[in-house]
Amino acid sequence: MITSVLVANRGEIACRIVRTCRDLGIRTVAVHSDADENALHARVADAAVRLPGAAPADTYLRGDLIVEAALASGADAVHPGYGFLSENADFARAVRAAGLLWIGPPPEAIEAMASKTRAKKLMGLEPLTSVTEADLPVLVKAAAGGGGRGMRIVRSLADLDPELTAARAEARGAFGDDEVFIEPYVEGGRHVEVQILADTHGTVWALGTRDCSLQRRHQKVVEEAPAPGLTPELEESLRSMAVRAARAVDYAGAGTVEFLVAGDRAHFLEMNTRLQVEHPVTEAVFGIDLVALQIRVAEGAALDDEPPRARGHAIEARLYAEDPSRDWAPQTGTLHRLAVPGVRLDTGYTDGDTIGVHYDPMLAKAVAHAPTRAEAIRKLAGALERAEIHGPVTNRDLLVRSLRHEEFAAARMDTGFYERHLAVLTESAPDPYAPLAAALADAHGRSRFGGWRNLPSQPQTKRYVMAGEEHEVHYRHTRGGLEADGARVVHADAHLVVLEVDGVRRRFPVARHGDEVYVGSTALTALPRFHEPTAAHAPGSLLAPMPGTVVRIAEGLTVGATVQAGKPLLWLEAMKMEHKITAPATGTVTALHAALGQQVEVGALLAVVQTAE
């Protein structure tokens, strides 16, 4: 029996594994980088071991250090979570060679499916070896790894070679393997997958389907189980192919077989030999704990002949610290408050934690389960709408609008959902009374008498920035209470304002963190009474839209070079995502401050392009 597990991962998945181990009475050991010294996963485990450094290559990807940590801490098993070394066959072998139990599939199965090209051959499929106009569009993919890294859609033959080069570079940096391949890109397809669980006694469970079609940058955003709208015949075909893939490599443990579905046809994509981020929706529908079952399988226990029955519908939304309206730019800073009521919340953060630049920007996964799909959608959208998320910009509003979009509600979504609807889904629609509520709460909080003065006064003015725009509000104290344009003040204190607008009373909870004010789900920044001078940048200045690392500079980019409008000049990498910085106009580079490998803060001046006269 396993008594102590080292979790070779970080963040949300590490916390989730610790929770199950604690329920089973198993001691846990965390590993952490220097950047994660105070991270939640390092705090909730029974013990923690430092991995010196901050970059993944120096820490969470160092299998030798993790094995040493397991031995030093007295662990007798290692759970890899997902990402990092979870699909690294050499790491699995090193764990076993050290006399530790590996909570995952056999290294041989990992190796067989680790390369997407080998996986396709096992399933009787071959990637494209040459591309013609008739083959377009195609998808360039990294043979190792996942999460959208090293993946490019190519719609023109002229773009093929540059995108192959870019995909190889990204794959090399992310996975240490620059092998890429080409396959047809299915327009309007749905991303559907099957959860597999197998034991070492020959039993393989196919735990239903999941739909993961809502994606940005080839990374999933909303997932659900079961996948809606599939015919019984197609669903049976998917399960059958998934079981065949598992048996082909003598699989054991949890895994996922992924498909692209178009019409009534399913195209095999890959098999992930690990737990998936979206596994909670399967757990909710089948009433199981997949991590607990992984541990049982690793201990040699046999699964029942048949899996439990599926019940109801579950939907998961990934909450990211990112700004969808600004090309999904990742955000950093202090997470003052995170609370999503009424649903399961898997997270690696708690109030007061810092969101840094080194890792994925996912804050949490919110999961709702209900008897029907429509009820699950309503439950999750309502929970996210009422959530308290105070800190960096997140994709919360996008998630709520996505769940309530008619295309999603009717289960007519596909992987191009955000390409079609992003502009509408990110339209700014802040509450117009939020600035007034913030001002009234602030005025009460600053009153030296602790309440409203029973004396008339001059009108008061406060200014806030909300959704990128400046708002000015006015109110005044009177003998009869407070007066404000367009609303009657029913109640006001430092934490709650109640306004009556057109005969309807509305409650506005208010929280303040420095100059940042949160009125319900609306974030505002208080401005000083007088405008302060700001640093001016020359026209054509390229500023870093996020903190990150300069990972590529366009060939030949130097001071004096001529550049064309829209052409990529620099590439920044932050939180596992790569972002292009393009020329704002055709002109000449008059300054270049960026250097390869340089760490930059948001707003840093990278280059200046002077527009051609």
Image (spheres, grey):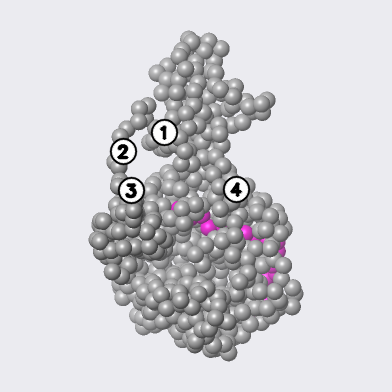
Residue 478's x, y, as percent? 52, 13
Please give the name of the residue rendered at 53% of the width and 58% of the height, measured from the top-left corner: 318
Whether residue 290 sits left or right of residue 181 in the image: it is right
Please give the name of the residue rendered at 50% of the width and 54% of the height, measured from the top-left corner: 324
Circles 1 and 3, Cβ within 8 Å, touching? The answer is: no
Q: Nearer the viewer, mark 1 or mark 2?
A: 2
Marks 4/1: CA distance?
A: 27 Å
- Residue range in magenta is 305-322
Please give the name of the residue rendered at 32% of the width and 72% of the height, measured from the top-left corner: 62
Residue type at mark 2 is Thr
Residue 28's x, y, as percent? 41, 64
Q: Secondary structure at mark 1?
A: strand
Q: Is residue 25 visible?
A: no
Please give the name of the residue rendered at 39% of the width and 32% of the height, measured from the top-left corner: 527
Q: Nearer the viewer, mark 4 or mark 1?
A: 1
Residue nearer the viewer, 560 or 152: 560
Indicate whether residue 42 is drawn in magenta. no
**Mark 2 — residue?**
534
Marks 3/4: CA distance?
A: 44 Å
Along the polypeptide, which appears first: circle 1 or circle 3?
1
Residue type at mark 1 is Ala
**Mark 3 — residue?**
539
Residue type at mark 3 is Pro
